[in-house]
Image (cartoon, grey):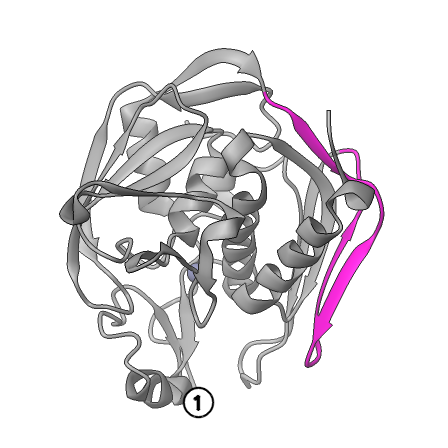
Amino acid sequence: MPLLSHFMHHSFQTLAQKAHIDGIGLHSGSQVNITLKPTSQTGITFIRTDLDHFSIPADFKHIKSTFHATVLGEGEAIISTPEHLLAALWGTGITHCDIEIDGPEVPILDGSAATWCDLIKSAGIVPLPGKRPIWKIQQPLRVEDHGAMMLALPYPGLRLTVATDFDISYLPQQLVDFEMEEISFSEQIAPARTFTLEQWIEPLRAQGLIKGGSTENALVLGEKEASSALRFPEELARHKALDALGDLSLLTSSQGALLQAHFILIRAGHGLHFQWMKAARDSLSPFITAI
Ligand SMILES: [Zn+2]
């Protein structure tokens, strides 16, 4: 039985029991242990068990950097690359969760959110008292940067339209359009993997990134072919949708709120998501109402 999408599920929910996994970070290459735990406190909170249990709430205001991955942090304590796990929690309707982690980066696993969905499913999901508030985008809000665009429109549900346009001879431009209430997140978005163009690898390594990267945890797109068979014809656009969901969860997760909007993303990435969220927060009252 696939997990249905719970993006518009009205109850607060947490895990039925804790769930553990370990793996390496894509950028740091470090091995980390991670345990998802039930809690009665609203929101998603990362807890650095190696730093005296320093806690970092998964919230927009703790975004520290968006260079090739989202990084949350406070002072010296950071949590890098949380976006796939955050998308899986949002997609399965988990509004309350403590995440214990003994290193600076969430494991990349196979580069997708499939394993996170399996882990949440195996732990089980239980309802909590209370009803989730709803944040509605009231007016169009658009940001643009170097040919990339992110636009949100008022909409009665949650819809995500994503277009990608990479210069890859054997992959056409890609477009996906998801009505989030009607799809299975765990089947249609979660399995899409992190990807990189082969020509980006050396420059990224030179900047100290992707130390844990391999064809086991990323789709590498060479000049003539990909490192493995695509899981979907539009796997790149689906992964971009996954990243956008993980980042956007940072806008509402501290309140466990539902988000109502139609997001249209063209060539967008973490940096543009951050710019859009900043614009939304700066103009909070005209654009968003909590009900
Ligand atoms: Zn990603």
* Residue at the spot of label 1: 223
**218, 246: nearer the viewer:** 246
Q: Position of residue 211 (x, y in %)?
A: 23, 74
| Residue at figure coordinates x 26%, y 71% from the top left | 213
| Residue at figure coordinates x 53%, y 29% from the top left | 256
Q: Quadrant of ligand 1?
A: bottom left
Q: Is residue 147 magenta?
A: yes
Q: Position of residue 278 (x, y in %)?
A: 64, 57
**Which corner quadrant of the image does residue 148 belong to?**
bottom right
Three-letter amino acid code at disc 1?
Glu
Q: Is residue 244 magenta?
A: no
Q: As displayed, is residue 143 above or below residue 196?
A: above
Q: Position of residue 71 (x, y in %)?
A: 40, 60
Main structural element of the magenta stretch: helix, strand or loop?
strand
Range of residues picked out in magenta: 132-156
Say whether residue 184 is visible. Answer: no
- Mark 1, secondary structure of its residue: loop
**188, 161: nearer the viewer:** 161
Quarter of the picture holding the N terminus = top left
| Residue at figure coordinates x 50%, y 56% from the top left | 243
The local crowd at label 1, few if under 14, some if 14 to 19, many if 20 or more residues have their Cα within 10 Å, is few
**Which corner quadrant of the image does residue 276 belong to?**
bottom right
In the shown orientation, is residue 146 left or right of residue 116?
Answer: right
Number of numbered discs: 1
